[in-house]
Image: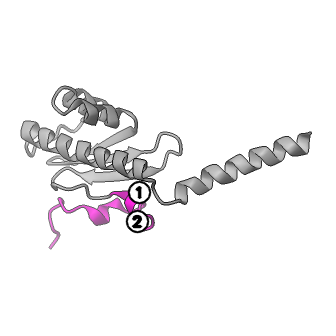
Amino acid sequence: MKNHVFLVLLLLVVVSSSSFCAPLSEVQKREYGVLESAVTFSSDKMIGEYGDAIPDGFSAEKFMEFVRGRIPKDYYETLKKYRLEIRPKRSYYLLLIFDTLSGSLILFDYSCTPEVDGPVLLGPGKYDLNNLNLYDKCKAPTR
């Protein structure tokens, strides 16, 4: 009996971990597309409000409070499904979105660009997640 329970648990772990690496289903792609649109739309609203002066203490909570009622409800509801983190960078911010179950980064965006900068789920292995500054098109060039 113990062996049977152990095998079932092991099988569940293998199946759940392998599903993360599997290609996205059409439903997942559709929801991910809504998430990308929500991020883009929210970024536009933020820049419209704050311009190039993102407050130093700006947080994910303040972000969600700000976009509520300013973006379509389905976009807001999609954003609420994920754990968000905001890193203010004076004239722009970095938005990080994490899968709530695995804790993995699934999307990142620098607010100064019109498109999502890091659709991580659509390009597994494409991004160096330990060095997101490599994708920062907003920072001033160094001389």
Residue located farthest toward the right when viewing the structure as drawn:
1
The magenta span reads: 119-143
Q: Is residue 129 magenta?
A: yes
Q: Determine the residue positioned at 19% across, 50% down.
A: 111
Relative image position of residue 12 (x, y in whole percent): 70, 46
Q: Is residue 35 magenta?
A: no
The vertical placement of 73 against 3, above or below, is above
Marks 1 and 2 sit apart, C-alpha to C-alpha, by 13 Å
Q: Give the main secondary structure of the magenta stretch.
A: loop
Relative image position of residue 43 (x, y in whole percent): 18, 44
Q: Earlier in the sequence, mark 1 or mark 2?
A: 1
Residue sitting nearer the eye, 14 or 131: 14
Residue 90 visible in the current orientation: yes
Relative image position of residue 22 (x, y in whole percent): 53, 59
Density class for disc 1 (Cα within 10 Å; few <14, some 14-19, many ≥20) is some
Residue at the disc numbered 1: 121
Query: Which kind of residue does numbered mark 2 sit on?
Result: Asp
Quadrant in which the N terminus appears: top right
Does dot 2 land on a helix, a strand or a loop?
Answer: loop
Task: Mark 1 vs mark 2: give the one in front.
Answer: 1
Q: Determine the residue positioned at 24% across, 35% down.
A: 58
In the rendered structure, the answer to whether residue 131 lies left or right of residue 51 reads right
Q: Determine the residue positioned at 20% across, 47% down.
A: 40
Relative image position of residue 85 (x, y in whole percent): 35, 41
